[in-house]
Amino acid sequence: MKPPYEITPTILRLITLISEKIGEVNASYIAKPSPRLRKQNKIKTIHSSLKIEGNSLSEEQVTAIIENKRVIGKQKDILEVQNAVAVYDNIASFNPSSEGSFLKAHKILMKNLVERPGKYRTSNVGIFKNAKITHLAPPPKNVPFLMKELFRYLKKYDEVELIKSCVFHYEMEFIHPFLDGNGRMGRLWQTLILLQKYPAFENLPFESLIRSTQKEYYAALETSDKNGNSTAFIEYMLNVLKESLDELLSFNNKTFTSEERLEYFLSLNSGEFTRKDYMNLFKTISTSTASRDLQRGVINKKIIKIGLKNKTKYKPAT
């Protein structure tokens, strides 16, 4: 069966806004972020997703782990980060429509953190708040069937991926298929579903906004539980995605210095290039601005000038 939810005016408005913003991202150079920006986004994603689950490590410590540096902290917290890095480093290898891939991701994410990583729970679980149970998950005997139905929904129904990703996230949290790691798996799998259709989401650490609106995140889950459908959660998550895209686009609209522009360009281009190539990336700058950027790069020994006049080319300094 198709999971229950309603398409509200709020959902329609948010889908329209998100679609427009994705178009803006695809039309701008941030659709191809530099390796440095991709690394920063990965750090934010891992740090925020684990922070929601109570991980005590700072963003600086997560960065150090990614760079294979020694970190002092709780062994469990360090292991959580190492496992998350292993998953996100290989995110392209997971198939969002495959239940087997889903279990494989959990096995990596929760390695040495739970007794049976990559296996569905075999005992009852409940979510407590202030010593009161707020959600009693379905019995363990029902979990395999419910998860198969959820993946059948992903494969069978011709629904907008923006909605599908939110529905899967909520329904997976409702089923609570694992003893631990459900929250981080829900956020990871929503990202994967979105990436299938919208590559821009690879560079969108929306977990940061979930962490900053954590009360609203759990409130949306609780409201959807009470209403018996995922509508409230879809509205919350679509708003998070919209605001994340706003942040990404605000980065694109910031005023860059000539040094920042050249550094960004060189992070994407390692061979020879012309002024025209430079301007094809930064479409809003004038010819004179591009010339000044490149001249300054030559003076600062960031690039080397080759040839004269209309034959002029540049290459990164080695």
Image (tube, rainbow, N blue to C red):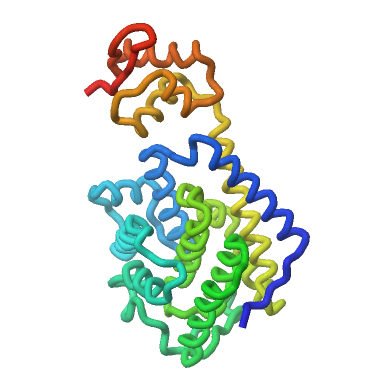
> With respect to residue 298, does 193 lie above or below?
below
Image quadrant where residue 178 sits: bottom left
> With respect to residue 37, does 207 lie above or below?
below
The residue positioned 64% from the left and 66% from the top of the image is 233
The residue positioned 40% from the left and 44% from the top of the image is 38
Q: Where is the N terminus found, in terms of image quarters?
A: bottom right
Q: Where is the C terminus found, in terms of image quarters?
A: top left
Furthest residue to the top?
Answer: 309
Frontmost residue, 79 versus 140:
140
> With respect to residue 228, does 200 lie above or below?
above
The residue positioned 56% from the left and 65% from the top of the image is 165
Q: Is residue 74 at least partly visible in the picture?
A: no
Residue 121, percent from left and from top:
42, 84
Frontmost residue, 148 versus 114:
148
Q: Is residue 107 at least partly visible in the picture?
A: yes
**Tally of marks:** 0
- In the shown orientation, is residue 299 left or right of residue 176? left
Frontmost residue, 208 versus 5:
5
- In the shown orientation, is residue 75 left or right of residue 119? left
Residue 237, percent from left and from top:
61, 60
> With respect to residue 94, does 103 lie above or below?
below
Furthest residue to the bottom?
Answer: 141
Furthest residue to the right?
Answer: 9
Image quadrant where residue 51 sits: bottom left
Residue 135, percent from left and from top:
59, 80
- In the shown orientation, is residue 288 left or right of residue 122? right
Residue 88, percent from left and from top:
37, 57
- In the shown orientation, is residue 136 left or right of residue 79? right
